[in-house]
Amino acid sequence: MARALAIGLLLLAAAAAGFGGYHYLNAKSPDSPATSRRPDVTLNDLAGSPQSISQWDGKVLVVNFWATWCEPCRREIPLLNALQSEYGGRGVQVIGVAIDELASVQDFLKSVPISYPVLIGEQEAVDALAGFGAEMTVLPYTAFVRRDGRIEVLHAGELHRDDATELLNRLL
C-alpha cells in the first residue's frame, strides 16, 4: 500500500511537471546548498550489481532521474543518448537513475535503447534524488555536476538541447 501511494505521488508530480509546465534551469548561487558536493550514491545496475556514482569522479556528470512511466522522461532519452555520444570523449558521463522496478526498466529497454549507464532503485532512488537537492519529487530531474564533484545546476522537467549543450560547454 505504501509503495503504491509513493508511486502514485510520483505519477502526480510527473504529470504536474509535464502538464503544468513546471520547468526551470537555474544555476545556483555560491551560497546555495545546490553547490554542495554531490552525494555518494550507490544503486544497483541492470544486472543487479551495486554501482557507486563515485566511479565517475573527475568527469562532468549529467545525472538524470527518470521513470519508465514518465512521458517527459521518455522524450528526453534520445537527447541524453546524443549528449553521451557527443560529449563522452570530452569527459562527460550521463547516468540515468530509474525510480522504478528492475523488471519494468528491463522491459522498457527492450524497445528503447539507452547508451549510458542506468542505475535502478525505488525508495533508494527517491532518497538519492533528495540527496541531489530536489526540493520536490518532479520527474525528470537532472543534476549537472562539475568535475570537482560540486553540483552546478539542478534542472526540474524535460531537458532541451540548447540548454544542455550550453551548460555542458560551460562546464568543460
Image: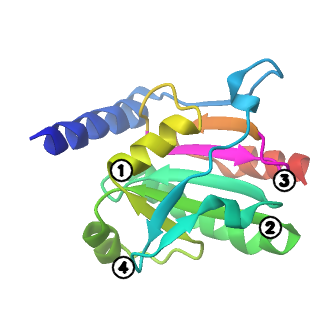
Looking at the image, is 71 positioned above or below residue 129? below
Looking at marks 2 and 1 on the same chain, the residue that comes earlier in the sequence is marked by 1
Q: Which residue is drawn at 73% across and 20% down?
A: 32
**Nearer to the camera, 56 or 144:** 56
Looking at marks 4 and 3 on the same chain, the residue that comes earlier in the sequence is marked by 4
* CA gap, disc 1 and disc 4: 15 Å
Q: How crowded is mark 4: few (under 14 residues within 10 Å), some or many (20 or more)?
A: few
Closer to the eye: label 3 or 2: 3
Q: Indicate whether residue 108 is drawn in magenta.
A: no
User: What element does badge 4 sit on?
Assistant: loop
For disc 3, the marked residue is: 147
Quadrant (top left, top right, bottom left, bottom right) of the N terminus: top left
Q: Residues within 10 Å of mark 1 (few under 14, many from 20)?
A: some
Q: Which residue lies furthest to the left in this view?
A: 1
Residue type at mark 1? Cys
Magenta range is 139-150
User: Residue 87: which numbered mark, if any?
Assistant: 2
| 8 with respect to 15 (left or right) | left
Image spot of residue 155 (x, y percent): 62, 37
Image spot of residue 123 (x, y percent): 33, 46
Q: Indicate whether residue 143 is drawn in magenta.
A: yes
* CA gap, disc 2 and disc 1: 25 Å
Whether tag 4 and tag 3 are in contact, CB under 8 A, the answer is: no
Q: Residue at x 37, y 54 (%)?
A: 67
Whether tag 2 and tag 1 are in contact, CB under 8 A, the answer is: no
Residue type at mark 3? Arg
* CA gap, disc 4 and disc 3: 33 Å
For disc 1, the marked residue is: 70
Looking at marks 3 and 1 on the same chain, the residue that comes earlier in the sequence is marked by 1
